[in-house]
Amino acid sequence: MNKNLNEWQEKDLKYIWHPCSQMKDYEELAPIVIERGEGINLYDTDGNKYYDVISSWWCNLLGHCHLRINAAIKKQVDTLEHVIFANFSHKPVITLCERLMKVLPEGLCKFNFADNGSAAIEMALKMSFQYHYQTGNPQKKRFMALTDAYHGETIGALSVGGVDLYSEIYKPILLDVERIEAPDCYRCPYGYLHGECNCPCIEKAEETFARVGDETCALIVEPLLQGSAGMKVYPPLYLKKLRELCDKYNVHLIADEIATGYGRTGKMFACDWAGISPDIMCLSKGLTGGYMPMAVAITTQKIYDAFYADYIEGKAFMHSHTYAGNPLACSAACAVLDILEEEKIIEKAQEKAVYFTNKIKEKFASHPNVGDIRHIGLINAIELVEDKATKKGFDSKLRVGYQIYKKALKKGVILRPLGNVIYFNPPLIIEKADMDYVIEVAYECMCEVLG
């Protein structure tokens, strides 16, 4: 055992298998044991401060230990911590649904709760299949998804995902999903720049719909932003055209807004940029401000009605989660909506996003290994390449992003890259001084690794 480890790190490594990690890496970089959080900052057991500019896996919306969310949970825990959600309900969940109805895209009105994002995706897929089966289209048994998609890591969610890092080894047990080539605005095969085209890449989707649309239940997408693919951003027009294709072929559009919802793209939901409504929307992460595990799949009256029948007809949606509609999580979620509305958080964040992006471009754009700088809302991503002219990326075995991440940690900034992409996805409350600091650190660390 490393003699430099403290007691808590030793205990951690003795018992815990961390997510999305090669545990052997922890021999070199031991787990950082966090004592407390405040605003965008985290503090470890030795008192070191870390700027959490990835929002603790994109879920911490309003900063750590927000006083208003804390108070809402403390108040709720004294009255009701949990209750079975079949044939029982409670005021916080009813209030939350009523509040969400005011901000959701038109037509979404029925809420089915789960306890994590992957579970919400599973519900959406099953819901779509069963709807078609019960409305005279039993041939619709397949799903479409974009290349480079990420929708979670349970079997169904992993099936519709398209990032091999997560799914390659499991392909023998995954669903057979029809893959549509996703837009790639950095390496556009049509030669256009981002936002300067009529989305000719939609032809890939058109070909797929023409071939298998009649046997497809649903198309699932991350609206406008493919997060785990390296924060790849595509135009609202492309999403709008996907909506039209789904309508034409009677295919549900499932919007995975788990990572993009709640102001991350500059509007409440990414779908709002395209002015479209999905048939099913999945929410989690920012839903509770990153406080409590909760997710929801929200759908239309039309889909709901296909399940509404006498019990003996066997049309009920027999899917459940023990902690569905948890009162503590719902209280946190209601507090989040209060804060967003009363303090104009999303509007202010969109103003700050202009400053953040301009500063990043000013600092990074001229570096010979910076291939692309892309952004939406406060999310900014910097793709590092070996050759700027050819856009050739670094060999993944070099782990360029990981080397930068380790250096940044020593300077108190949490970057956690996506391959060769370093990115910022901070809480919406980040201030300009914090932006300046994390940009400077990220640049210094990049130069230390790449020169």
Image (cartoon, grey):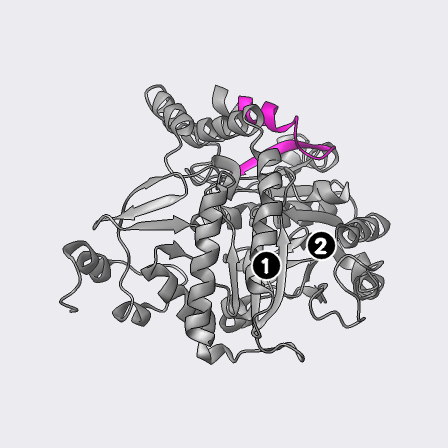
Mark 2 surroundings within 10 Å by alpha-carbon count, few (fewer than 14), some (14 through 19), many (20 or more): many
Q: Which mark is residue 362?
A: 1
**Whole-percent x and y of residue 383?**
57, 67
Residue 100 drawn in magenta:
yes
Locate the N terminus and report the quarter of the image it occupies.
Answer: bottom left
* Residue 378 in view in this figure: no
What segment is highlighted magenta in the picture? 95-113
Residue 391 occupies which quadrant of the picture? bottom right
Q: Which mark is residue 147?
A: none
**Whole-percent x and y of residue 188?**
74, 69
Q: Which mark is residue 219?
A: 2
Residue 340 drawn in magenta:
no
Residue 74 occupies which quadrant of the picture? top left
* Residue 323 in view in this figure: yes
Circle 1 SS class: helix
**Which of 45/220 is in front?**
45
**Whole-percent x and y of residue 409?**
35, 60
Q: Is residue 131 left or right of residue 43?
A: right
